[in-house]
Image (cartoon, rainbow, N blue to C red):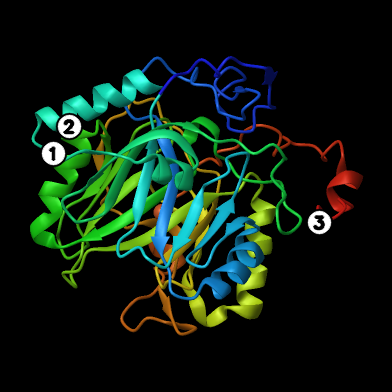
Amino acid sequence: MSQDNNQPASLIQRRDLFGLGAVAASLALTDKGWAATDRSASLGLQSLGYVVVPGKDLDAWGRWAPEVFGLQLADSSAATRVFRMDDHLHRLAVDLGAQMPSFGWEVAGPGALDAMAARLDAAGVKVASGSRALASQRGVRDLVTLTDPAGNGVEIFHGPALAHSPFQAARTMAGFRTGPLGMGHFALMVQPALFEKTTSFYRGLLGFRLSDYTISKGAMVVEFMHINPREHSIAVIANPDNKNELHHLMMEMLFMDDVGRSYDIVLDKYNDRIGLTMGRHINDLMTSFYVRTPSEFLMECGWGGLLIDSEQWKADELTAGGSIWGHQLMKDGQPVEGTFLPPPTARALRAPLQVYGENFEVGRRPKALDQVLKTEPLT
Ligand SMILES: [Fe+2]
């Protein structure tokens, strides 16, 4: 597709909310609302752009996602609900017709899309051009589609459509950490027999790099992989239940207080839907909790994720469990039998907070405490 109409009409220099510096966090808008493709000269995948998940109860999703995560309902049809979490028109879609989830990965432009498609084709992967109808449905200029070895949809696109109106959170909150880091991360459960094939697919063919991993010894076998400074954009887990399914999707909020507010709402209204209590992960240092969605997979609500420099990063085995503290596994409002939090004396791990942008002050009272305490609701 032509990029003739993709000349920047205005430039928005954002505050450094993403912790990457002003250049990486700048976006250009055109008069057609398309995102500029100046984030990187890379021909490879850049970030997780959108996720489409199967859903049965669209009305439940339409209530739940705004209430718990503050997502903005952007579009509804008889078969779908589409939610915004930033200036992109299409971030999370729930689709009655989907059997498996699909994950959209952004590349820099049409050249990068062609190069990725050619590379996959040469490797014997079946790659299909996305129709104009599908591109329009996904809110992108152009895309190709394929499936991973576990049957998940993989969509590679360029040119996400941006909204003409600012993101309007469904409740008072500062928003989400997205931009060049993408919309978050997700974890796939795959049949153990497909584990190697799936991790090789993402690392060998799609260009992901290993972040950390566990090997058996009674624990679950997991590989965490990154594609940008977010510590991981994908985790692949060998599923003891021998099923291929989405385990969780993580969205990272800009302020920890907004995660706490979500937790309050979940404790009050969805206590029996908590999957993991509040805790802090040992690898990406995310402070988060997990709650079961109306589609039964989990969503992780997080803050303070670690950014890494891929060139310097050394992938390591995780030998001390998944969390520094918290993350008690729950089912129906009760701790899952046989699981427990380690006693405090057994776990003396700690790590610095990963702060960025304007969401911290060191050793002094916030300059704008009045404003912090008296922010008017956004809606
Ligand atoms: Fe996660």
Q: Secondary structure at mark 3?
A: loop
Secondary structure under tag 2 reads helix
Q: Label 2 amino acid? A: Leu
Disc count in the image? Answer: 3
Looking at marks 3 and 1 on the same chain, the residue that comes earlier in the sequence is marked by: 1
Residue name at image x 65 percent, y 60 percent:
260
Tags 1 and 2 in contact by the CB under 8 Å rule?
A: yes
- Circle 1 residue: 125
The reply, left or right, for residue 231 in relation to residue 66 is left
Query: Considering only order in the chain, which callout, 3 or 2, is on the residue closer to the N terminus?
Result: 2
Residue at horizontal 57 percent and vertical 54 percent from the top: 83
The residue that disc 3 covers is 379
The amino acid beneath tag 3 is Thr
Q: Is residue 72 above or below residue 312?
A: below
Q: Position of residue 268 (x, y in %)?
A: 66, 78
Q: Quadrant of ligand 1?
A: bottom left
Please state if 124 lies on the left or on the right of 154 as rendered: left
**Residue 207 spot, x, y in % from top left:** 25, 30
How far apart marks 3 and 1 lie (CA) works out to: 46 Å
Q: Is residue 196 visible?
A: yes
Depth order, front residue of 6/343:
6
* Quarter of the image where the N terminus is located: top left
Foreground of the two, 179 or 342: 179
Distance of label 2 from label 3 (alpha carbons): 45 Å
Question: Cβ–Cβ below 8 Å for labels 2 and 3?
Answer: no
Q: Which residue is mark 2?
A: 120
Q: Mark 3 vs ligand 1: CB under 8 Å?
A: no
Q: Classify mark 3: residues with Cα within 10 Å, few (<14), some (14-19) or many (20+).
A: few
Instruction: Tell me: residue 192, above or below residue 91.
Output: below
